[in-house]
Image (cartoon, rainbow, N blue to C red):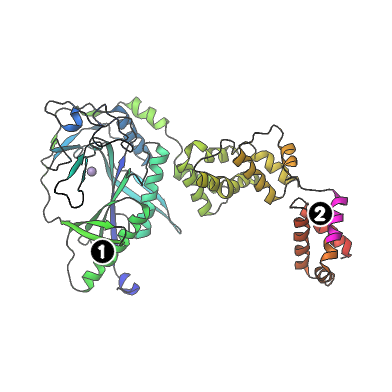
Amino acid sequence: MISDVVRKTYTPTIGIECHVQLKTITKLFAAVGNDARDAAPNTLVSHICLGMPGALPVLNKKAVEYAMRVAFGLNVAPQKYSYFERKHYFYPDLPKGYQISQLSQPIILGGSVNLELNDKHKVVRINRVQLEEDAGKNTHPQGKNYSLVDLNRAGTPLLEVVSEPDIHSPAEAKAYARELWLLMRYADVSDADMFHGNMRFDVNVSVNKDPNLLGLRTETKNLNSFRAVEKAVEYEIKRQIELIEKGQIIVQETRGWDDAKQKTFSQRSKEEAHDYRYMPDPDIPPVVLDDYVVESVRKSMPVMPIEWRRRLAGLGLDRLVIETLIDAQAETPEANYLPFIEENLAEVAFSKFIVNHIVNTIDPIRKETSRTASNWDMYLKDIYDLQHTNKLSSTNAKALLVTLLSSGALPKDLAKYAEEQGFIQVSDEGEIAHIVSKVIKTNPKAADDIKNGEEKAVGFLVGQVMQNSRGKANPALAQELIKKQLDV
Ligand code: MN
């Protein structure tokens, strides 16, 4: 174990590569279905996926459009000229003997990702993003003397996003992974379903005592959750420092992540660079983007998280509340949480009321039922008005909203509906005075305390009045009447 003191003498440096699966209907170069989640093995294949001699790939236009969207999401324009190359290697899940990728002229060069950490804002620069095809999948059944190859995934479009080594802690690595996920969801280019491997992260980690020098790095591959990214980086930093402190050397190698053991493990050493014999793919013409095409994609971009944070900041919300909203919008874009808040930004108090109920009422229901009620925003203004004219307590405002969302009711007259459902606050003085006198009689000790100037006891009796009225008494009026009846 290394101490914090020793650890602080080292600077960790982390670069992250992320493969993002694009949600095109068909594959990158073949008119074959791209969603393999429920497909039987080798049913989404064609002569192109199988690499039959003479098969001619045709580039999917939508994949190029998605790449352009990601470029703008990364705050950079796509390259007007890019082309595809063949990256040669032999593996059973790659029948062609090469992967179609981009090396010399990728579709995106440069760009940046903006991170919000607890205490600071951070920019991670992007080196490049290349458009490429995925390979198939090998499985090795236990105890059998054969392996299985499924080519459903062969030819699925991927964007490989390569960061600069600008990341320096496990927390930053995790924040970067989440921000990329947000970006893909907001740009609407990928389902970004981590569970199904739509985003896979490879982390390059090194440590050095001199912050201006880079140590030998390891690459831990195929991490598929933000937590795994954070934990794998954390583990590698500790492991490498321990080795150096013991006078041993770091081996430059590829490692895997064992999620059950929360450990990285050696997969293969990377002593020499592979010779992939890259060459331009003669079957696919270069991609040349016209200005008007690039411009129309730029204009179609939605508001991205960095801009939402800026717009929401005006409401003076807690950072965590803002991030909860940003996540909720990413998870259910069709609910349009953020646009609805924005429509009402001019009314600050009402906007805060909306935010409060999205975070504490509406989004928790969505998470529980895995769906968003279509009427989530219809009655917020009415409920707000009822609460602020003292017809609804804040507790009953929430209860009324929950009832509306879970029943799917669409009442024409909300005040009437709230009345019928028993949520409307009683502000009838006679009725409350009656409950107050009853409560004072049954709580003589609290009544005495109030007479002796104990303010806390007033709160207690108001609570009793609320209970006796099943939450419907106007608490301000109840308090007034308690004091009046006790002569204080
Ligand atoms: Mn790749």
Mark 1 surroundings within 10 Å by alpha-carbon count, few (fewer than 14), some (14 through 19), many (20 or more): many
Numbered tag placed on residue 72 in the rendering: none
- Residue 285 lies, with reference to residue 135, above or below; the image says above
Left or right: 35 with respect to 429?
A: left
Numbered tag placed on residue 207 in the rendering: 1
Q: Quadrant of the C terminus?
A: bottom right
Left or right: 60 with respect to 356?
A: left
Q: Residue at x 78, y 53 (%)?
A: 469
Q: Nearer the viewer, residue 38 or 166?
A: 38
From this viewpoint, is residue 163 visible?
Answer: no
**How many numbered circles are shown?**
2
The magenta region covers: 424-438
Q: Quadrant of residue 102?
A: top left
Q: Quadrant of the N terminus?
A: bottom left
Q: Position of residue 146 (x, y in %)?
A: 15, 46
Circle 1: residue type? Val
Circle 2: residue type? Leu
Closer to the chain start, of discs 1 and 2, is 1
Report which residue position mark 2 lands on.
Answer: 477
